[in-house]
Image (cartoon, helix red, strand yellow):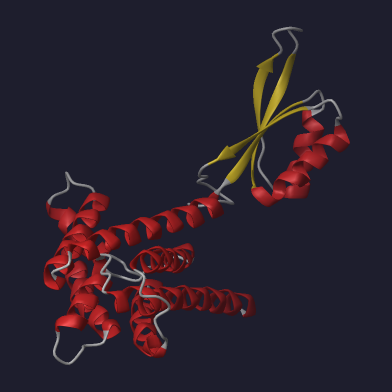
Amino acid sequence: MLKKIFRVTYEYTAITFGSLLVALSLNLFLVPNKIAAGGFSGIATVVYYVSHYKLPVGMTMLALNIPAFILGVRTIGVDFGVKSVYGTVILSVLTDITTFVQCVTYDKLLASLFGGALMGIGLAIVLLFGATTGGTEMLAKIIHKYISFISVGQILLGLDVAVIVLASVVFKNYELGLWAVLTLFACSKLIDAILEGVNFAKALIIISDKSDIIAEKILKELDRGVTALHGVGMWTKTEKNVLLCVVKRHEVSRVKNLVKSIDQRAFVILTDVREVLGEGFSV
């Protein structure tokens, strides 16, 4: 029970921290420079500048998310999960709480790059712990239900472009649209780098006369599965088992040392694995 409480606390702390980074990216770089890089945050930025009372960006984002969530439940019956609801609410709250921070730079290039990068890091952390921060992703899923021949990703891209065009027209400054595209690019690259980097695994192909002993050690000491493939050495015409084992990056050295301790002449091939689905890895 205590372990579960610690895990849940850790996850929600991480989601909060990721949301804080996104909020800071808005207040330190994007909103002060009128860079509306798509999504509900982009719409909220436009509303902030055109509204007479300077409506808070965070509350505007939350106001946009509420009907999107309701429409999503009614239309596609999506199970958002508590984490996503929390991520959406906490991002809105933190965005308004951190408005006291001063803009770091009014240089549009720096604001676009660093704002996009900080947002990407924050969103990646949120996604890593199984949450989202709402936004146009929900609208994309709703629209996809009616035009399924277009992917959710394409619809999402279209919505982001529409927000960027809207902001450019409202602000009467098309350069801001170009800066927003740069921000989106930086954000997406950071998200991909972090998520793919974390999910990277290593595959080892091990050829040895002592494959049975090596496999048993990997199974017991590393608690990793091993698959034996039937192989034939074409030079010697000798039949032997070829071991295939997929491990996480930090486990590679342990496997190599283990193999070396059993068979100094073992032939080991090490290669990158982009994604692994199954027990012990992502599902």
Determine the image quadrant of residue 23.
bottom left
Question: Residue 24, how many percent across, how many down?
Answer: 42, 78
Question: Residue 227, how many percent across, how many down?
Answer: 64, 33
* Residue 82 shows in this picture: no
Count of numbered circles in the view: 0
| Residue 255 in the figure: left or right of residue 82 | right
Viewer-proximal residue among 50 and 265 = 50
Relative vertical location of residue 226 with respect to residue 40 in this rendering, above or below = above
Relative vertical location of residue 146 with respect to residue 227 in this rendering, above or below = below
Residue drawn at 23 percent across, 82 percent down: 60
| Residue 181 in the figure: left or right of residue 132 | left
* Residue 60 shows in this picture: yes
| Residue 225 in the figure: left or right of residue 68 | right
Residue drawn at 57 percent across, 79 percent down: 5
Question: Residue 184, how many percent across, how many down?
Answer: 33, 59
Viewer-proximal residue among 270 and 23 = 23
Question: Residue 250, how many percent across, how many down?
Answer: 69, 51
Determine the image quadrant of residue 21.
bottom left
| Residue 110 in the figure: left or right of residue 171 | right
Determine the image quadrant of residue 260.
top right
Residue drawn at 47 percent across, 65 percent down: 121
Quadrant that contains the N terminus: bottom right
